[in-house]
Image (tube, rainbow, N blue to C red):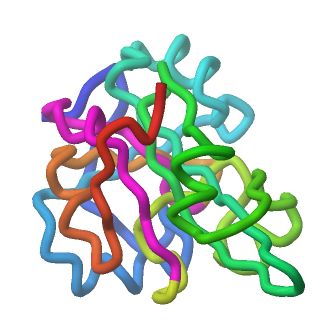
């Protein structure tokens, strides 16, 4: 099932961030596996090159902060590694914000309880929408972060649509 040259195994708490482990207890999605990696290779291009995972099978999760006046709202966007989220169009409008941008690293880490470079859509704050580009769901399996830089998760892509606050959006990325 899982791509690349990794040692995929059942998820264990030591290989994912605490919020991810907690969320996976009740996750009704399909089979989820995890593989340890060299944390210095967690960034997508280096990871895919070293572990023989096609960029098309890797999905990135980015945290977006939208602002309207004094109110800041957050969302996570899941897009294929070969694409980029339309932050200033689709995401900004979905958040009802005047301005949207990538959340500052310190905020993303503090709010998610995950490591920067390993943030995943599984286990995010319950009030955040998880915006999933429809193209991600066309893949059989995707590799995503695990909440830490020292591992990656693989799961059937369709399972991302089962996340509690998931919204599948056509054209979220280009």
| Image point (34%, 76%), residue name | 165
Residue 141 belongs to magenta span: yes
Residue 10 rendering spot, x and y as whole percentages: 24, 59
43 to 166, vertically: above or below: above
Q: Nearer the viewer, residue 88 or 140?
A: 88
Q: How many marks?
A: 0
Residue 165 belongs to magenta span: no
Q: Nearer the viewer, residue 46 or 172?
A: 172
Residue 70 rendering spot, x and y as whole percentages: 88, 86
What's the magenta region? 128-147
Q: Is residue 156 left or right of residue 170?
A: left
49 to 92, vertically: above or below: above
Q: Nearer the viewer, residue 130 or 81?
A: 130
| Image point (37%, 36%), residue name | 171
Q: Is residue 143 left or right of residue 103?
A: left
| Image point (41%, 68%), residue name | 122
137 to 125, vertically: above or below: above
Q: Quadrant of residue 162?
A: bottom left
The N terminus, quarter of image: top left
Residue 150 rendering spot, x and y as whole percentages: 60, 48
| Image point (84%, 59%), residue name | 105
87 to 160, vertically: above or below: above
């Amino acid at each position: 099932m899982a791509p690349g040259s990794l040692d995929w195994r059942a998820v264990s708490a030591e290989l994912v961030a605490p919020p991810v482990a907690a969320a996976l207890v009740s996750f009704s999605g399909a089979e989820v596996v995890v593989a340890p990696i060299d944390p210095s290779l967690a960034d997508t291009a280096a990871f895919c090159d070293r572990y023989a995972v096609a960029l098309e099978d890797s999905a990135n999760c980015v945290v977006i902060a939208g602002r309207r006046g004094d109110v800041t709202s957050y969302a996570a966007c899941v897009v294929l590694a070969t694409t980029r989220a339309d932050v200033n169009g689709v995401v900004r409008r979905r958040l009802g914000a005047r301005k949207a941008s990538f959340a500052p690293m310190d905020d993303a880490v503090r709010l998610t309880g995950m490591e920067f470079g390993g943030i995943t859509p599984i286990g995010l704050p319950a009030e955040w929408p998880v915006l999933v580009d429809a193209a991600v769901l066309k893949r059989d399996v995707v590799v995503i972060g695990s909440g830490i830089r020292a591992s990656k998760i693989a799961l059937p892509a369709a399972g991302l649509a089962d996340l509690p606050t998931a919204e599948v959006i056509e054209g979220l990325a280009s």
